[in-house]
Amino acid sequence: MSRLKYAPAIFDRCVTHLLRSVRDFAPNYFGDVFVHSRAVNGKTDVEVHKEHLRKLLGFLRKYKVYASLKKCFFGASEIPILGCLVGKSGVRPDPEKFRVISEWPTLSNVKELRQFLGLATYLCKYVENYAGKIRPLSQLLKKEAKWK
């Protein structure tokens, strides 16, 4: 039973190996495949993207690898990945994550504070001087801290 804990990593390695010939435009991450395309040789980015999709889908069909259409995004200008939105203009935080943080109820104990800081830390790269802004909250994690 303990060998099952390695299953996700083994699966990812198998998919990476299988898709190695298309990794220039279709990298994968734990079962998710991201197809990205740019205009080249007089073709638009949409035309190149269609070619890439045809090649990838043909490849998946050939090796009998299946995808859930409910989880697929086709022709999207940006896609959600690990709590962020990735698109032509780069990576930006998912607005839903910021909404959840801004609407978080008032904290009343250390457990709630840890939950809040866990989510907030996930988005720290998008907040200038994050460490300075959370310092007062971090002080409340100390044993001698007093909650008002």
Image: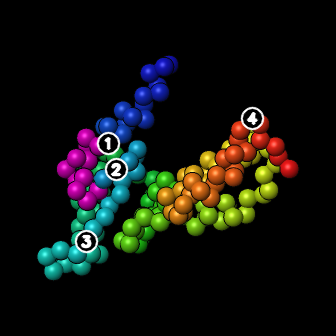
* Image vertical order of residue 50 relative to residue 145, above or below: below
Residue 116 position (above or below residue 141): below
Q: CA distance from mark 1 to mark 2?
A: 8 Å
> Which mark sits nearer the N-terminus, 2 or 3?
2
The image shows residue 118 at horizontal and vertical percentages of: 62, 47
Residue 15 is labelled as 1
Q: Is residue 21 magenta?
A: yes
Determine whether label 1 and label 2 are within 8 Å by CB: yes
Inter-mark Cα distance, 3 to 1: 24 Å
Bounds of the magenta segment = 15-26
- Mark 1: which secondary structure? helix
Query: Element type at marker 3?
Result: loop
Read off the residue under disc 3.
38
At x 46% / y 25%, what residue is drawn?
4
Q: For this view, does 50 lie left or right of residue 95?
A: left
Mark nearest the camera among 1 and 4 is 4
Give coordinates of residue 64: x percent, y percent.
Answer: 31, 45
Under mark 1, the amino acid is: Val
Could you say where residue 83 lies in the image, as x and y percent from the top left?
52, 56
| Residue 70 seen in the current view | no
What residue do we see at 36% from left, 53% from top? 33
Q: What residue is pinned by disc 2?
A: 28
Q: Nearer the viewer, residue 82 or 138?
A: 138
Q: Which residue is mark 4?
A: 143
Q: Amino acid at mark 3?
A: Arg
